[in-house]
Image: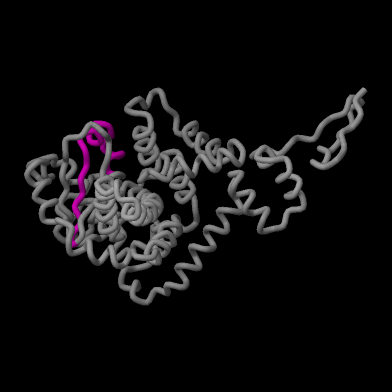
Amino acid sequence: MSDDGHQQSGHEKVPSRQRRRFPGISSRAYEHPADRSALVALRKLSGFDTVFKALSGLLPERSLRLLFLSDSVRVSDQQFAHLNDMLRDACYILDLEKVPPMYVTQDPQPNAMCIGLDEPIIVVTTGLVELLDEEEMRAVVGHEVGHALSGHSVYRTILLFLTTLALRVAWIPLGNLAIMAIVTALREWFRKSELSADRAGLLVGQDLRASMRGLMKIAGGNHLHEMNVDAFLKQAEEYEAGGDLRDSVLKILNVLPRSHPFTTVRAAELKKWAESRDYQRLMDGHYPRRSEDKDTSVTDSFRESANHYATHVKSSKDPLMKLVTDLAGGAGDLGGRVRRGFGGFAATPPKDQTSRNGTTTEEPPADAPPRDED
């Protein structure tokens, strides 16, 4: 029995600070709608099923496990005991029966991943362990356990393998194109899955400020005295709303080769969810159970994802998203904005002009003849 009165079921060590536990929680409780819809789109990609089935039998998973066993440090009561406590605690809170093996590998780059086909393995780098404090690290461990509970490790493993394979067959034009199409789709899904796992990390740590600090450190290093959470979140707003249509296209091109979303975007998304009614209901004990997963409607999940995207597009300050909204709504000024070129889609609309006698005049239409100046 733990200090908070819960039966521990094999998870012998829990932290002294009491945290809410979520018995039987389904991954649907914290999965981001974009994660689910991206996975649906991925599975519909031509050739994906064939590649998935082939790789499932060919990937050297046993070799992967032996590699970490031989050249990394396995977390246990004797090695990195504080990480072992966090791992057991995370599995206890999210009610994951089998605790996945965790390894610490020598790498100065702060990183963590959950991989494996049959059973998930969690790997964290020394760079991450040295960078984060206990509460920040607890959120990261919860993040990776969330990946395990959602079954993300299978697709992550295939993404790692295909990324390596694409480099080896880059000299074969058609072969590389086919692989890169699947890699691009996998990356798009994985970026969305990170938003889901961030939510799982918050459910485990139950400390939003620690989650924010961890993301800030991943972005800017171990200089918390030089950083500010509110200013960091303001960067996310500036990133989304800034520039014109050209910048929107550059944002897409910048994110395509990445496996993770930008850290400011992740922080903003997590804060938004933490302040939502859905999160509060979950913390109050109202959440979907794994026992109900078999009765879940795929159509309902897809509809929820579609509604999320529609709401996101309408509320977004990004110039490209505004263009999509204008196209859908048939905005009256769309023709003029197109004629003005990319600059016509600037995030901030032209301000009203004030004449010399103090009266306010509207910006003239793009196709109006020039006015005579004094």
186 to the left or right of 334: left
Q: Which residue is drawn at 82% across and 32% down?
A: 353
Which one is nearer the viewer's eye here, 150 or 174? 174
Inspect the magenta stretch and tell me whether residue 326 lies in it: no
Q: Which residue is drawn at 11% across and 52% down?
A: 63
**Which quadrant, please, contains the N terminus?**
bottom left
232 to the left or right of 122: right
**Which quadrant, please, contains the C terminus?**
top right
Q: Is residue 4 visible?
A: no
Q: In which quarter of the image is residue 104?
A: top left
Q: Residue at x 44, y 55 (%)?
A: 279
Q: Which colour scheme is used?
A: one colour
Q: Give the range drawn in magenta.
A: 118-138
Inspect the magenta stretch and tell me whether residue 129 lies in it: yes
Q: Quadrant of residue 222?
A: top left
Q: In which quarter of the image is residue 11?
A: bottom left
Q: Where is residue 178 in the image (x, y as percent from the top left)?
A: 35, 57
Which one is nearer the viewer's eye here, 293 or 207? 293
Q: Residue at x 71, y 39 (%)?
A: 349
Which one is nearer the viewer's eye here, 186 or 242? 186
145 to the left or right of 218: left
Q: Where is residue 256 in the image (x, y as percent from the top left)?
A: 42, 45
Which one is nearer the viewer's eye here, 235 or 288? 235
Q: Where is residue 68 in the image (x, y as percent from the top left)?
A: 12, 46
